[in-house]
Image (tube, rainbow, N blue to C red):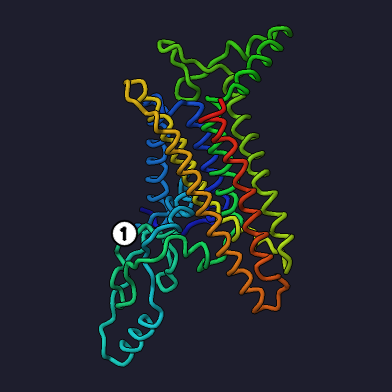
Amino acid sequence: GLGRPIPGWMRWGGWPFVAFLGTTLYGQLASVYQYPLGALVVLGGSTVAAIIVGLIYGKGTRVWCRQLCPVNGVFNLLARLSPTHFRTDQARWNAHNQAVRQGNAVRMHAPDCAPLIPLKQLDSAGDCHVCGRCSGYKDAMQLEWRAPGVELVEPPQPVRFTHYSVLVFGLLGIAIGAFSWSASPWFVALKQQLAFWLVDHDLMWPLTTTLPTWILTNYPEHNDVFNLLDGSLITLWIVVGGGLLGALTSLPLLLGNWLMGGKATLSRLWHLSLSLIPLGGLGVFLGLSATTMTLLRGDGINLTWANDLRATLLALACLWGLRLAWRITGEQHNGEQRNGGLLAGNAARLIGTASVALACLPALGIWYLMFWGW
């Protein structure tokens, strides 16, 4: 390739959320889970885009994966729950460098880190692709076991708003909106009301206009056609509904962050929100597996246990999140105590944990409606 440096616009931190939103919307409008053409556009288009980016920028590195991939932000969050990770032992790193300077060790060729991570500071699973190229480098880097979630309690790098946006407004907002519209009677009622209004005002074009199959679902042979009204409502449902869910999830976190006392910084809020990663990750699993469940039921397979399993998994995800919240607030308390903060011990921890419990309710409410209420 050309090996050009990564431009500033590509390094913008908001791409993970924007790409996730765009892919989610297109996936619903083109019915990627039902028809191959939509899936071909999403996966094939991403592959072509990745090849083009790789041919222009970087030198054999995964610039697309690191900067523009639609699921990079999601994987970055979920990887932080991993029970294993590659980590650099700083003492061994420095000892090897010292030995090289003294002539007691051979200088090692630096491995090519595909996702462009500074290897000396490698201590997070978020950006790492676990390719193993760096394993054994300077006798300081190896794959290690760790307690799941420890990286959320003590993040090696500052938590940023980009992480918060992908988690709260992406996984717990946009994604749930995408999974819920097709099962919602509210969506059907809203569509009917708008259709009646359009007919009464002699505006028939939104009801009769369709788009090419690769843009908007258009399979008349399967009696499955989206008109402009369908496409517009699906988009509004996902964007507005996802934004509302994200806002409802954010409110208790903001309130808890303020009531905890001390210096209610946004960085503390971003850190506390990481407690919701188990619920956000499980939500993607539940939403995607719903299609599988529907197909299996269509084949006559008995799945009466499915909802009990879903309820159990949701309860476990919330309990895990509350435990993470308790540990995160304890870590924050210790940090503010060292810095002269005003947190009031266990009272502040209880407030922070309670705010996470309240933040779980919007997502839990939609899952309840999808699997039990509707």
Whether residue 224 can be seen here: yes
Image position of 283 with respect to 303: above or below = below
Would you say 182 lies left or right of 204 here?
left
Q: Secondary structure at mark 1?
A: loop
Image height of 146 relative to 28, above or below: below
For image coordinates 28% across by 72% down, the residue present is 136
Q: How many marks?
A: 1
Query: Residue placed farthest to the bottom in the image?
Result: 102
Q: Quadrant of the C terminus?
A: top right
Rendering coords of residue 155 (x, y %)? 52, 66
Nearer to us in this view, 68 or 95: 95
Residue 100 image-quadrant placement: bottom left
| Viewer-closest of 204 and 179 | 179
* Label 1, residues with CA under 10 Å away: few <14, some 14-19, many ≥20: few
Q: Is residue 329 left or right of residue 79?
A: right
Q: Could you tell me residue 212's position as x and y percent?
A: 48, 19
Q: Amino acid at mark 1?
A: Cys
Q: Which residue is mark 1?
A: 131
Residue 12 visible (yes or no): no
- The structure residue drawn at horizontal position 29% and vertical position 77%, both measured from the top left corner, is 139
Q: Position of residue 6 (x, y in %)?
A: 48, 57
Quarter residue 337 falls in: bottom right
Residue at 52% across, 68% down: 154
User: Residue 117's spot in the image, x, y percent?
Assistant: 42, 64
Q: From this view, report whether residue 239 is shown above or below residue 337.
A: above
